[in-house]
Image: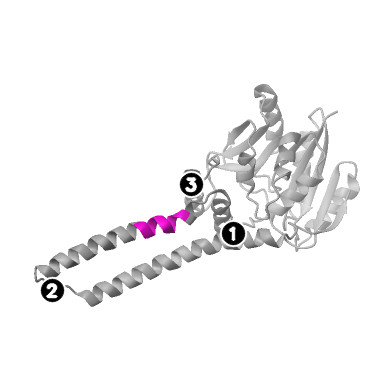
Amino acid sequence: MELLSVVVPCYNEEEMIRIFYDALVKVLNTMDMNHEIIFVNDGSKDKTLEEMLSLYEEHKDTVKVIDFSRNFGKESAFLAGLRASKGDYVVVMDVDLQDPPEFIPKMFETMHKNGDDIVGSRRVTRKGEPAIRSFFARNFYKVINKMSEVQIVDGARDFRLMKRQVVDAILQLNEYERFSKGMFVWVGFKAEYLEYENIERAAGETKWSFWKLFRYALDGIIEYTNIPLRFPALLGGLLTCIMIVELIVLLVLSLLGKPVGITTLILSLILFLGGVIILAIGIVGEYLAKTYSEVKGRPHYIIKKYYE
């Protein structure tokens, strides 16, 4: 029988582990295939690991647990789970049940019906989310899709089903700074997305603060477009043209004998150009920081113990 691997990254989710497992297995047992569930403990500080190991002791034939030495982030947890997976098909999903397990059979049905290599999911509403977070999330997709070489589906979740060939292609991407939503699209292959309305967490609280989401969005933009690097050059060219026109206007006014507040004008120009220069240095600095992370060549994560 074919094997399905389910990769589940977790951080401080002690309340959700058992609830999620029961809901997931209820669905998997209806499917005519073997399965393995790979929990990745991303340096949790509560009893998440204890809950995982309890399930592992009860179901050693299907449950695996990867325990990180500290918190390395969701992207690293995804990567560790994908590397450990052995399935002909792989599902990545969150433990909070905002990714509904009952969608997995629908994903398989869609994949076999249409010959897809990837079947993802996307939310068509953001009901239950803070208004400011929803506003920035919607506009993030608009911005990155206008600037990036890849087109990320608006509302796309990490929750998706992939064939082994797709997983192997993703694992060939070795960059340290990882942005899964972009990687899933960049590798290509035929993909389709199932739509559903937003589902609130079954228990616990989200670990994604507004600042973490902002940094994640910024990482995605930097990883998949060079336009911000070109922006200072374009702005510099525009300002040069404006300054040439302004000098001509000042010259004409001076020839006509009209007074010009030259000190105020010079100070304004200096402050404006100083702000532009700082902005340009900041943009270049972000790219240099990413380059520095890659050059260091550190591992994406360190596994304290692997239970299988």
Residue 239 placement, left or right of 157: left
In the image as oriented, which residue stretches furthest toward the top?
113
Locate residue 232, reporting x and y percent.
Answer: 43, 59
Locate residue 179, reporting x and y percent.
Answer: 63, 50
Q: Earlier in the sequence, mark 1 or mark 2?
A: 1
At label 3, counting other C-alpha atoms closer than 10 Å, the crowd grade (few under 14, some 14-19, many 20 or more) is some
* Eye-nearest disc, 1 or 2: 2
Quarter-wise, where is residue 61 in the image? top right
Residue 272 placement, left or right of 12: left
Q: Is residue 199 visible?
A: no
Give me the C-alpha separation between circle 1 and circle 3. 21 Å
Q: Amino acid at mark 3?
A: Met
Label 1 element class:
helix
Labels 1 & 2 near each other (Cβ < 8 A): no
Give me the C-alpha separation between circle 3 and circle 2. 45 Å
Q: In the rendered image, which residue does mark 2 sit on?
A: 259
Locate residue 195, reporting x and y percent.
Answer: 58, 34
Colouring chosen for the image of the structure:
one colour
Q: Amino acid at mark 1?
A: Lys
Residue located at (11% from left, 68% from top): 255
Locate residue 98, reporting x and y percent.
Answer: 64, 44
Q: Which residues are magenta?
A: 230-237
In the image as oriented, which residue stretches furthest toward the bottom?
263
Residue located at (85% from left, 45% from top): 63
Q: Amino acid at mark 2?
A: Pro
Q: Main secondary structure of the magenta part?
A: helix
Quarter-wise, where is residue 97 in the image? top right
Q: In the rendered image, which residue does mark 1 sit on?
A: 212
Q: In the rendered image, which residue does mark 3 sit on?
A: 147
* Eye-nearest disc, 1 or 3: 3
Residue located at (70% from left, 24% from top): 112
